[in-house]
Structures are given as C-alpha cells and as structure tokens.
C-alpha cells in the first residue's frame, strides 16, 4: 500500500511538469467559517451496515454482489489517498476495526496522522451503529465501550459526536446515557416521524437540547439534531461513479459547461435548508449507504463546489465534520428548545409505522438477550478465576454481541441468510465462553483440592437448550448409584431464592442442598407439546434425534449467595417418603363447565374451564383483587396493492406493522385444559389451538404469574401473513395511559393517539400506538398498578383502556398471483429495502415448517405506588437468569472434597436493593472494569428512589484495592476530564420543569464507598496492589 501511494505521488508530480501549459485547476478548499453568511458544512461520510442484505463479512470484502454492490474495503482503500490529496478534505467514519488490522505499519502511520490532523474523525465509535428500540442498555454500553477502548488504544482519541443516522426511531436512553454520559457533545440522527419533522421544520426546532432523563435532568442533556430529510445529500448532489446527479463541468472548452447552474442549485438548496434552521450554520451529509467506493469522485465534485460557491459569495461552503459543526453552533450562544421523552414510534409516511420490527425475528431477539446475560456472568467468573493470556475467553462472544446490536440485526430487519450469520456468530462466541465458564466454575468448586495447574477433575456441562426441554447432562439414569451435582451460579449482587427446573428420567429422586439437607422438590410430567418441541428442534439444531426422553421436570427451590454459587445433589431416592413429590394432574374434558382456583401462595388465579380463560386474580397479602382475562388474537398483514393515489402502496413487513383486521383466537372444541398441583408450583396447561400452547405457572413463594407460551408454526395456507398478540384485560380505568421502558432503564409515559411534541393525525390506531418493550409495560389507575415483564424485546401497547397487548410472533408475507406466470405466487415485503418477506422456517431433512416461538412473560398487580419494586428487582432476575452447570458423580464423598457454596463478595454483604452490578470484567492490562447502576428513577419508589451506597472493599474483598479511577460510561476518559470539556447549552426559558438532580459524590480513596443517585450509572477502573490471589477454600 505504501509503495502504491509513493508511486501515485511521483506520477502526479511528473504529469504536472509535462503539462505545465495545461488548464490544470487548483481548487481553493481552505475556506473556514465566515460570520454573517450561511455556512454550509459539507460532511463527507458513508453509512456502512455491519450486515443487512449481505453479511458483515460479505460487505467488508465485497462478495455476493448479486444482492448489493458494496465493499467496505474499497471505501477505506480509496479514502486514504483522497484525503492525502488535499489537507482540507475531511471524512467521518464508524466501521473501521477490520480494515485497520489488515493494514501495514506504513498505512497505519498515515491514518494516524489523518486522525491527528482532524481530517479523519471517528464518530459514534462503537462496534456498530446500534438500534435504539430492540436493544438493552447493558448491551449498547458494552458494544460502545468495546469500540471506544479500541479507538483510544490505537489513536488516543475520544469520539465527541453521537451519529445515529439510520436507526428507526430514537430512545431517551440514547440521548442521556449513550450520549451525554459517554461524553458526546452532540447527537445527530436521520429518522423521526414525518408529522413531527414537518412541525419542526415550520418552527425551526429540528435542532434542540434533549433532556432524556427526568432523574438526571440537565446534568445529562445533549445538543441534538434531526436532519431535514434523511442522512443523504440534498437532491442533485450525489457523486458516486454511477449516480445521476449533474457533475460540476468547469472546462469551458467542452460542451455542457454548467458551473453557474450548479452554483445556483447549491445556493438554492442551502437557502431552503437555512430557512428551517436556527443560526447561520447548516449541515449537508455528503454520502449515504456504502458510498465512496471510489472516493475521488465525491471529493473532486465537492472541491469544485466549495471553490465556485465561495467565489460566487452568496453562501459559504466548507469541508467540515460534526465536531466542527457542533462547535460552530455552540459559539452562536443561541438558546434552544428542550426535548424530553423519545422519538417512538416512527412513521416515514401515512400508514407506514415502523413498529413491526419491535417483534420481528423473536427467536433471534431472545438469543441476543440470553447471550447478553450469559456474557455478564461469564466476565464475572473470568474475573473470579483470573484472566489468562491463553485458553478460552469472552472476546469472541463480546464481538458477536456487539455486532448483534446493529440496527439491522437484533431488529430482525435483515435478510434471512444474514440473520443466520448473526446467530452463528453468537453460537461460536457462546461455545468459547462456555468453556471459560465451565473451567472457572470447576476451579472455584474444586479449589479445596485443586493444585493450580492442569484441568479440573470433573467435567461440568451446561444446559443451553433447556428452553426446549433438552439437557443431556441431567438426563441420566440415577438408579445405578450415580449422583447428579448441580452448580447454580448467581450473577446478581444480592442473595437470590428461586426455583430451577431440569428434565429428569427417574421418578424416585431426592434433592439435597449444599449442607447435605434434603429439600422439598416436585416432579411435573413433561407434556406432549414440549416433547414435540424438543424432538423437532434438537433434530433441526443438532442434526440428530435425542437419545432419551425425560419423563418429568424436577423443580426445587435454590438459595444462592451474591456473585456466588450453591451446589445441589440429585440422587436416587432409597427410602419411602424421601423422594420428590409427584404433581397431581387433572384434565378437564371437552366443555366441562367448572371454575378452578390455582396457587399455593399469596397469589390465586381463577379459571373458567369451559371457556379456557383466566377470570380472576387475588393477592391475599396485598389485598389486591382484579378481574383478569387473557386471550390471543392475530392481525392479518395488510396488502397495500389496493392503496390508491395519492397514497403510496404499503404492505406489512419486517419493519412496518400495518394490520388489516383483528381476529380473536377462540379455544377450539378439542382445546385441552389441564391443572398440575404441587408443593412448589401450580400449573395450568392449555392447548389453545393447534399452534398455540400455554402454561400459566404460579410459584408458591412468588407473587407474580408466569406465562409460558409456544406459538407457531403460524398457519399461512390462506396466503396472508399473521401477527400474533396476547391481550390481558382488566377492569382498570387507565384513561388511555400506559408506560413502557426505554432500553430497559427509564419508564416513559404513553398516551394513546397522542404525542407530546405535535398534534397527531391518527391514520393507524393500532400500529401508531405500539412501542418497544425491553423490560416491561405497566398501567395504573387510582387503585392499582398492573405490570407485565418480558424475556426479550417485543412490541407492546394498551390499545384499549385496562388492557395490555404484547405482540409475540410475526410471520409476515403477502402472496399475490404473478399474471405472467399463472401458477407462480410472489411474496411481498414492506418495500424498505430488504426485498424479502418475513418468512422464518426451520428445516429437518429438507422438510421445512414455520418457526415456533417459545417464550415467557410475567405479570403482577400491586397497590398503587408499589409496583416498581417488583418491576426493577424481578427485571434483573429475568435479565440475569441463574447459570447451571451439571456433573455426574459416583459415591457420596463429593461434599468433602469440594466447595459447596461460595460468594465473591464480603461475608454477609450484598448490594443495596436499588443497585445492580452491570459490569465486572478483568481487562487485558490487569485492571478491572466495574459498573454500578442505580435501578430506580427519581420519585419511582418511596423507599428505593434514594441515594445508595456501595462499599467497594466489601464488593471486592479478596484483594487490596490500590487505585480507583472514575471513568465516563464507555471507559475511554476520566469522568473529571469529561466534565471539564462538557458543553453547557443555553435553553429557552420555561422549556422544561426539572426535579432536583441527585448524583453521587467523589469516591474517598480511604473509605472506597460509591454513592449512586437515582438512575445514575458509575464506571470505574480499579487497580489492585498485587495480582489477584483467590483463596476460595477459605471463603
């Protein structure tokens, strides 16, 4: 590469001498900002997806061009010489790491100079441009941190600008957490609702100060801007090789000379944008998807435009970056309007609400969420064991998870082969992390006898397919004297009591806890629906049928210390009365009319057996009682071919939810209704119809309802896609109001058919009221709060007062006859670029069926004001499920040679109830990255929305802490330095009312106590005085 660059430079010099009398033109591109004129900031950029129509690898190397001609290597290879050709040229970029690692030292040195000079600027700086609807805040923090630390290490720079130009709506968490708390000075994006955009154009409020958190208020606000149209140049200013915009033809000896015409076009577009923008500064985003594959074609035309426009003098044009633009805006000392809440839902035109992707590809969404919690736990165990330079680690899973946060990944808006690629990467990452987890747990469990070298003596196996009732490690015959050892790890910072369930073969089994005491356990027969799910998907995923079929689920209650494990022993029961309790089972036949009450604890549910519906909810402790009815429906996918002008035809698809009617799913005549009861769990099994199966589960020691569902394959024999929802209806008077979470953090108030920022014209009363849910949704009246929590990102709403709607699964295709081929049917999508129907299938031996989705949601009713405690605490348990590792053992001496219980925190210590440990990770340099998050908003709970204290000496007790440095959220700069550089923007008077902001103070190096105010996340780098020695045996 270096040789090529030198040769090109010599060739340019030689040609210059040979044609000294030629018309060679030197364009003046050095212009800076000119006060008093409209300053047009030309920001050269390319938007390169890490997967969409092609996989991330295909995009990088430029393969599979029959789908899309795009090659990221070409973009960067051509960019470097283009920037070297003129020191005034600039470029911004966000997809870099792969290319960088392929370059020679000479090219890397040149690029470092370009970065240092400001010609090449990193914006956003994460591993991807993450989605803002279907992502969890922990994931987007992790992926941003990964990218920011890479940039800091290689270039010693910290990105200043948030650049979320393509996600399909924008979250409050993005503004205050992934914007202000990262240290960004501004945030720019491309997509807001078309009605909102029109209103903002009229009142010049496309740029504003975004105050995304009511808890952190102005201390975490950020200057933000929505582009006037999208993230592309104005019409007529596209300059890729094959683009049809007129170039600037400035050779007067040739035909089609058009300099003045092009200058006039430029000035007209600039004035038009200036008329909807405050101050004399406007930004033109010069580029779009996968542009600059031959960068010189763009820069040649921009050089000419800058030169001739500035000679004309009516407006001023300059090469710029978002940082330069932001500084120019700040220097004007303008007062800006305040924006609160978020930009959901997003519609780009009438009947086109991008709310379908909140649920699209629910299996991939669940996989991402499961791997996220696993990654958090794996890093903890890696820290407790000690990170090594060799052997398995979490790096591969970190990379896969980071890419999966992309706005065409977890969203489900990619082609099927790309979705498969994301899942494959997660699987590869999990496989390596699984080895790390097994090794780490084994070292901790065996530390009493472990010598510190070699491999652990006992293999411990996880159960990654437990959701489809497949766990070979547990499916062993214990009647021959073997024991099954279950190690249960808790990644939460507080003690956890929960019920675990594993499939077993034997009926006569007993369970002992870590102290050898027999504990109560329950056997629940494995139902036919789950056996069928297990057999089909094991064959589909593993390529072979399972060898054994377990007969029961074995359920028992575990108690696990914070950041620690407990062990449980399952053995063959030798004496009468010593074995697990078998559940009583009763199946109601046909339309047998009866009511049945279930629940061994405080919560009781009543069902009508003939209607197959839940009818009543009672909590005896809180004295809450409510009529509750759950049902299933489906929306048929709309076929937009019948839309007439001026409407643009709009189908339902992977992005867009456009229903064409709602159809209630009534339990069929043969619908089954079975009740299982036992000392730990009561279950109601319902075969709603041939493709919906549900279990409603009540745990004796819990005060919520767990609903497990299997939905699919969704029937499409009629050629119409369907979007399946469940509705939970109550008698609550909710006045059109409900609340949904923002990326699992703050809850935002929603009012049906209403927007805070403009007068909404309602065209789609269903789709226009759906919102993304990552943690939960709730509604309230003057008596009670009804809360629903979910196990993955989905779409949800309250389309009727007193009712919560959850979209669980989508099979969105529309078939029409191709009249050129009378026997052929075409599958339509929503015309947003994917050109592929959302038609997920699973195949066994070339026999393909529609995808089945297994999942869970949870609900609870509390007295008014009491619901936050459950939403926040149990929400953490959903995100961080208990991690299981199983091993077979001969004999009864296991407890004598192993550690049976362990906690990584100090004796009798646990985190406060309102604090979560969201990162504990040993880095390559031996430092430890620690993040603590306050879980509650200001005023959310009377007891827990207060300052919390965390004692670092107790949280990390096994090593003396040497130094604690507070960092910004992405850990690429010290917090104090970030605060010094923060731009404080003026806002219009009376723009927003603000509660008193409460933030934790400086950490005293002697006391080492961290304070956290409501919704505050604090990030630290910790150095220990010597290498971490883990005396687990003494714990």
Image: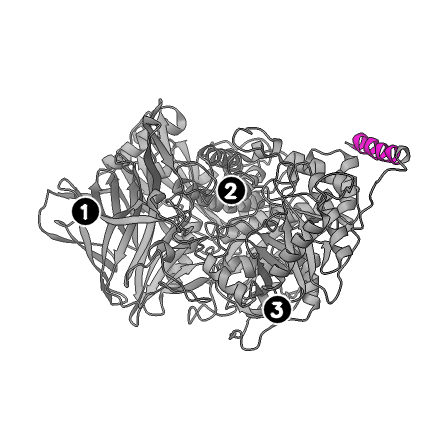
* Residue 305 in the image, given as x and y percentages of width and height: 72, 50
Foreground residue among 387 and 709:
709
Residue at image mark 2: 404
- Residue at screen point 58% across, 60% down: 225
Q: Is residue 753 above or below residue 533?
A: below
Please say if the residues under marks 3 and 2 sit with CB atoms less than 8 Å apart. no
- Residue at screen point 48% across, 64% down: 341
Residue at image mark 1: 666
Q: Residues within 10 Å of mark 2 (few under 14, many from 20)?
A: many
- Residue at screen point 45% across, 66% down: 758
Highlighted range, magenta = 2-16
Q: Is residue 996 above or below residue 157?
A: below
Q: Residues within 10 Å of mark 3 (few under 14, many from 20)?
A: few
Please say if the residues under marks 3 and 1 sit with CB atoms less than 8 Å apart. no
Q: Is residue 366 above or below residue 784?
A: above
Q: Earlier in the sequence, mark 3 or mark 1?
A: 1
Secondary element at image label 1: loop
* Measured Cα–Cα span from mark 3 to mark 1: 57 Å
């Amino acid at each position: 590469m270096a040789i090529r660059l030198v040769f090109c430079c010599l060739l340019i010099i030689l040609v210059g001498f040979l044609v000294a009398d030629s018309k060679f033109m030197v364009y003046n591109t050095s212009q800076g900002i000119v006060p008093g004129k409209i300053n047009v900031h030309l920001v050269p950029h390319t938007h390169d997806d890490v997967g969409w129509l092609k996989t991330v690898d295909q995009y990088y190397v430029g393969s599979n061009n029959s789908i899309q001609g795009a090659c990221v290597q070409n973009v960067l290879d051509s960019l470097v010489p283009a920037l070297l050709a003129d020191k005034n040229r600039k470029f911004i970029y966000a997809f870099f790491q792969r290319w960088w690692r392929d370059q020679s030292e000479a090219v890397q040195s040149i690029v470092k100079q370009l970065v240092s000079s400001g010609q090449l600027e990193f914006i956003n700086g994460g591993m991807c441009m993450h989605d803002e609807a279907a992502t969890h805040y922990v994931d987007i923090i992790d992926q941003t941190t990964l990218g920011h630390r890479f940039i800091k290490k290689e270039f010693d720079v910290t990105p200043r600008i948030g650049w979320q130009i393509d996600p399909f709506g924008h979250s409050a968490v993005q503004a205050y957490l992934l914007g202000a708390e990262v240290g960004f000075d501004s945030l720019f994006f491309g997509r807001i609702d078309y009605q909102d955009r029109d209103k903002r154009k009229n009142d010049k409020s496309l740029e504003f100060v975004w105050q995304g958190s009511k808890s952190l208020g102005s201390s975490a606000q950020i200057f933000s801007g929505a582009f006037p149209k999208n993230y592309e140049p104005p019409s007529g200013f596209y300059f890729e090789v094959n683009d049809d915009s007129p170039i600037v033809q400035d050779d007067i000896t040739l035909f089609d000379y058009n300099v003045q015409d092009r200058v006039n076009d430029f000035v007209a577009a600039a004035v038009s944008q200036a008329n909807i923008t405050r101050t004399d500064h406007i930004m033109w985003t010069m580029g779009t998807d996968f542009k600059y594959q031959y960068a010189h074609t763009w820069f040649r035309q921009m050089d000419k435009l800058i030169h001739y426009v500035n000679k004309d003098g009516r407006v001023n044009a300059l090469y710029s970056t978002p940082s330069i633009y932001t500084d120019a805006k700040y220097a004007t000392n303008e007062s800006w309007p305040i924006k609160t809440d978020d930009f959901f839902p997003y519609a780009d035109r009438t009947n086109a609400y991008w709310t379908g992707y909140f649920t699209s590809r629910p299996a991939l969404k669940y996989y991402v969420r499961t791997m996220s919690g696993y990654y958090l736990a794996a890093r903890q165990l890696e820290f407790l064991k000690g990170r090594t330079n060799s052997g398995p680690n979490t790096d591969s899973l970190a990379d896969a998870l980071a890419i999966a946060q992309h706005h065409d990944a977890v969203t489900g808006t990619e082609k099927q082969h790309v979705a498969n690629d994301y899942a494959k990467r997660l699987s590869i990452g999990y496989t390596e992390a699984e080895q790390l987890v097994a090794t780490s747990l084994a070292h901790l469990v065996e530390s009493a006898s472990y010598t510190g070298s070699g491999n652990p003596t006992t293999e411990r196996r996880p159960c990654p397919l437990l959701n489809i009732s497949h766990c070979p490690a547990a499916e062993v015959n214990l009647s021959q004297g073997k024991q099954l050892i279950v190690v249960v790890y808790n990644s939460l910072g507080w003690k956890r009591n929960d019920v675990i369930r594993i499939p077993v073969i034997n009926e006569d089994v007993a369970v002992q806890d870590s102290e050898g005491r027999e504990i109560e356990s329950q056997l629940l027969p494995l139902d036919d629906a789950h056996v069928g799910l297990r057999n089909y998907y094991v064959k589909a995923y593993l390529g072979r049928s399972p060898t054994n079929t377990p007969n029961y689920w074995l359920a028992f209650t575990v108690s696990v210390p914070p950041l620690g494990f407990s062990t449980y022993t399952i053995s063959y029961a030798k004496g009468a009365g010593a074995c697990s309790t078998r559940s009583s089972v009763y199946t109601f036949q046909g339309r047998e009319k009866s009511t049945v009450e279930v629940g061994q604890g405080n919560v009781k549910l009543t069902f009508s057996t003939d209607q197959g519906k839940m009818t009543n909810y009672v909590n005896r402790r809180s004295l809450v009682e409510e009529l509750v009815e759950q049902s299933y429906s489906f929306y048929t996918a709309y076929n937009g071919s019948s839309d007439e002008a001026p409407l643009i035809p709009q189908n339902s698809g992977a992005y867009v939810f456009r229903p064409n009617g709602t159809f209630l799913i009534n339990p069929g005549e043969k619908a089954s209704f079975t009740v299982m009861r036992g000392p730990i769990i009561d279950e109601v099994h319902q075969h709603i119809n041939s493709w919906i199966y549900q279990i409603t589960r009540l745990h004796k020691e819990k005060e919520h309802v767990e609903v497990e569902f299997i939905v699919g394959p969704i029937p499409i024999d009629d050629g119409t896609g369907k979007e399946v929802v469940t509705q939970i209806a109550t008698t609550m008077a909710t006045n059109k109001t409900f609340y949904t979470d923002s990326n699992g953090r703050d809850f935002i108030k929603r009012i049906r058919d209403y927007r805070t920022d403009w007068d909404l014209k309602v065209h789609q009363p269903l789709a226009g009221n759906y919102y993304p849910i990552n943690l939960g949704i709730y509604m309230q009246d003057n008596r009670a709060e009804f809360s629903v929590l979910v196990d993955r990102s989905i779409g949800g709403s309250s389309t009727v007062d007193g009712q919560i709607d959850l979209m669980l699964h989508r099979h969105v295709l529309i078939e029409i006859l191709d009249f050129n081929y009378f026997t052929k049917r075409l599958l339509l999508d929503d015309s947003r670029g994917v050109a592929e129907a959302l038609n997920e299938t699973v195949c066994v031996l070339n026999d393909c069926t529609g995808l089945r989705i297994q999942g869970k949601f949870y609900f609870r009713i509390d007295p008014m004001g009491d619901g936050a405690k459950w939403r926040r605490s149990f929400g953490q348990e959903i995100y961080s499920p208990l991690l299981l590792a199983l091993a077979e053992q001969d004999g009864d001496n296991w407890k004598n040679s192993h550690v049976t219980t362990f906690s990584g925190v100090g004796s009798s210590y646990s985190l406060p109830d309102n604090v979560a440990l969201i990162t504990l990770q040993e880095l390559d340099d031996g430092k430890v990255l620690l993040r603590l998050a306050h879980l509650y908003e200001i005023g959310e709970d009377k007891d827990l929305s207060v300052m919390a204290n965390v004692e670092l000496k107790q949280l990390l007790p096994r090593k003396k802490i040497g130094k604690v440095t507070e960092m910004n959220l992405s850990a690429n700069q010290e917090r104090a330095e970030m605060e010094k550089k923060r731009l404080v923007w003026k806002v219009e008077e009376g723009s927003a009312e603000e509660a008193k902001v409460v933030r934790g103070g400086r950490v005293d190096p002697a006391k080492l106590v961290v304070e956290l105010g409501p919704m505050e996340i604090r990030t630290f780098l910790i150095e220990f005085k010597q290498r971490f020695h883990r005396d687990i045996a003494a714990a």
